[in-house]
């Protein structure tokens, strides 16, 4: 997704107000952007607190700063700067966290971001975007360039079945239809489930929905119909339960008197075995891999 | 103002009052911006803004009241001359560096001034920002350090000694000037100077609680509100000065 991100920003290079700050990261990815932006590309060094404060100052001068780092380094280290300098003033700064969730795999727990959007969404006026597919960036980036509020963009590994074309970006997208219940996945996790889902017979296949934006966007009527018909809902996300999309969805369903008979929330659990591995390894440990999610789903759907 | 609202922080306000008056009366132009990094000196900032007609008598009467814009630390919105809410220390230099860099990228010529405390340099983020400002050669940025020698729970020399602070700045390659922070002319002259490379740092030696004998160089006036008797004595001493 990083290449698509770079390409997307390169397409917006003509915007004179665009400024890009990186916390000394982007090797073999951001070089074209650096070359295109010239003085508007700033390597702020390994100093994320200052980088976010500088971005707030730039935004106050009418510029549109993008702040880039590995996801935990862009949301956790400079949290107070995001809160005080950016969000208290509702400045249009885009925070970009690469490798959301377990994206950095065996690099280890310091490089994982399992709490990012939950923590950031506690801040006033901030919107989080979790694109699922590389192609989402071509739509999202121009939109973020126009945004008037603080934004967080969580980049992951775009997982898209090679034989299908991803639907255009939207906060909610329906990827598959079936009669086995409803499965909502947040961001790239939806892509990892799409192919395996379509291989299931229609009777066991869930309606697969992808959620890519928070705070929780209004639920589409079709999703409400799916929920009403199936009465079974699973929501899966590579994020801890606290502050999650699942909690927000449960609240929305309760408040709208449309809670399904069965509600299951599958989340990041940290490090249950105390061992480290690839993103797939960690997803599997949490039951977030396609086999675990769909097997449980199938049994749930069984008579 | 502090007496009527029954709040403290007056010691650190009085240590930088002369600096702020110099900045607002002798240095800042319409194109320039000021960031108060030591946000607990908001009272002094409000007085400085009042002295140049940017706040009214009625505004000052609202200091610390319910529904006010003049909170104990600078507000995030509502006062155009205050670009940022501050109060958590260590933010101002990065914010000011962003403003200064923004001028450069926009092709505008304003300067940015930022006032820090001395204890604030305990914060690692101040050094991050100093390194950044120097590396970016932000010659339109000037940082003033209100060096009153006292911080929250002791003398700066006893809490986390940074002396000699000016030498440390110089070791980072930053042009550093030391002045008497209560000498308006010296502060203004130092801030008007434009070194070959940026940023400029002015270390202003000050006295906490300056001008009021029972407050001068006393830690407790970081916190205490004045009694009526103390207020009357303070007023007499300031009037007689």
Image (tube, grey):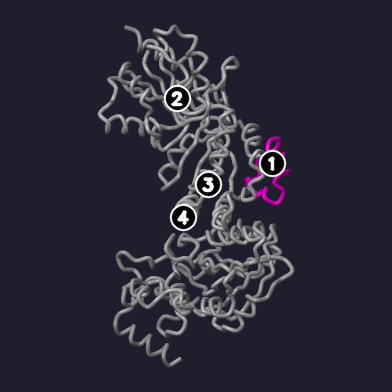
Query: Which residue range is magenta in the image?
Result: A20-46
Chain letter for mark 1: A
In the depicted structure, whether residue A4 falls above or below residue B46: above
Gap between marks 2 and 4 measured at Cα: 32 Å
Category of crowding for the residue at label 1, using alpha-carbon neighbours closer than 10 angstroms: few (below 14), some (14–19), many (at least 20): many
Disc 4 on helix, strand or loop? loop
Which tag, 1 or 3, sits closer to the chain's start?
Answer: 1
Residue bearing the label numbered 3: A77
Q: CA distance from mark 2 to mark 3?
A: 27 Å
Callout 3: 10 Å neighbours few (<14), some, many (20+)? few
Q: Which residue is mark 4?
A: A89
Determine whether label 2 and label 3 are within 8 Å by CB.
no
Residue occupying image coordinates x 27% and y 33%: A255
First in sequence: mark 4 vs mark 3: 3
Q: Are marks 1 and 3 on the same chain?
A: yes
Q: Chain of mark 2?
A: A
Residue furthest left in the image: A257
Subunit of mark 3?
A
Q: Residue at the location (27% across, 20% down)?
A: A261
Q: Quadrant of residue B70?
A: bottom left
Image-quadrant location for residue B8: bottom left
Residue that badge 1 annotates: A33
Q: Nearer the viewer, residue A172 or A186?
A: A172
Q: Position of residue B101 (x, y in %)?
A: 64, 58
Q: Nearer the viewer, residue A94 or B216?
A: A94
Q: Report whether mark 4 lies on the same chain as mark 3.
A: yes
**Element class at badge 1:** helix
Q: Which mark is residue A243?
A: none
């Amino acid at each position: 997704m990083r290449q698509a991100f770079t390409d997307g920003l390169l397409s917006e290079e003509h915007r004179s107000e665009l400024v890009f700050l990186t916390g000394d990261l982007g090797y073999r990815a951001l070089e074209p952007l650096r070359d295109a932006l010239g003085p508007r590309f700033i390597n702020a060094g390994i100093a994320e607190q200052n980088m976010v404060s500088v971005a707030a100052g730039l935004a106050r001068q009418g510029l549109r700063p993008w702040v880039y780092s590995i996801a935990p380094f862009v949301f956790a280290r400079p949290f107070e700067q995001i809160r005080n300098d950016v969000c208290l003033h509702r400045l249009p700064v885009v925070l970009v966290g690469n490798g959301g969730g377990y994206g950095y795999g065996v690099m280890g727990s310091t490089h994982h971001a399992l709490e990012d959007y939950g923590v950031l969404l506690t801040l006033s006026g901030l919107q989080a975007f979790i694109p699922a597919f590389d192609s989402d960036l071509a739509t999202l980036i121009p939109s973020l360039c126009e945004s008037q509020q603080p934004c967080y963009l969580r980049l992951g590994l775009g997982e898209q079945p090679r034989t299908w074309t991803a639907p255009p970006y939207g906060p909610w997208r329906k990827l598959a239809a079936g009669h086995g219940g409803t499965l909502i996945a947040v961001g790239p996790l939806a892509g990892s489930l799409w192919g395996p889902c379509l291989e299931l017979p229609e009777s066991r296949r869930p309606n697969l929905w992808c959620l890519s934006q928070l705070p929780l966007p209004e639920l589409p009527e079709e999703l409400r119909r799916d929920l009403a018909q199936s009465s079974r809902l699973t929501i899966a996300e590579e994020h801890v339960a606290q502050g999650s999309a699942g909690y927000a969805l449960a609240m929305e369903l309760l408040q709208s008197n449309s809670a399904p008979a069965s509600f299951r929330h599958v989340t990041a659990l940290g490090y249950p075995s105390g061992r480290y591995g690839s993103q797939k390894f960690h997803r599997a440990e949490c039951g977030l891999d396609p086999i675990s999610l769909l097997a449980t789903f199938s049994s749930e759907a069984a008579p | 103002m502090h007496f009527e609202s029954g709040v403290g922080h007056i010691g650190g306000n009085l240590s930088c009052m002369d600096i702020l008056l110099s900045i607002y009366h002798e240095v800042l132009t319409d194109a320039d911006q000021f960031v108060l990094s030591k946000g607990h000196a908001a009272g002094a900032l409000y007085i400085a803004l009042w002295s140049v007609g940017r706040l009214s008598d009625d505004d000052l009467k609202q200091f610390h009241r319910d529904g006010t814009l003049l909170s104990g630390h600078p507000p995030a919105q509502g006062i155009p001359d205050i670009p940022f809410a501050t109060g958590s220390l260590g933010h101002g230099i990065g914010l000011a560096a962003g403003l200064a860099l923004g001028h450069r990228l926009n092709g505008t010529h304003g300067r940015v001034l930022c006032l820090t405390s001395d204890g604030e340099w305990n914060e690692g983020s101040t050094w991050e920002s100093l390194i950044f400002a120097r590396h970016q050669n932000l010659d339109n940025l000037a940082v003033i350090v209100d060096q009153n020698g006292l911080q929250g729970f002791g003398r700066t020399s006893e809490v986390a000694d940074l002396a000699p602070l000016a030498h440390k700045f110089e070791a980072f390659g930053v042009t550093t000037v030391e002045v008497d922070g209560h000498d308006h002319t010296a502060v203004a002259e130092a801030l008007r100077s434009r070194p070959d490379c940026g940023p400029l740092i002015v270390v202003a030696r000050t006295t906490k609680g300056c001008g009021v004998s029972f407050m001068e160089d006393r830690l407790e006036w970081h916190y205490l509100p004045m009694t009526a008797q103390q207020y009357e004595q303070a007023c007499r001493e300031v009037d007689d000065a």
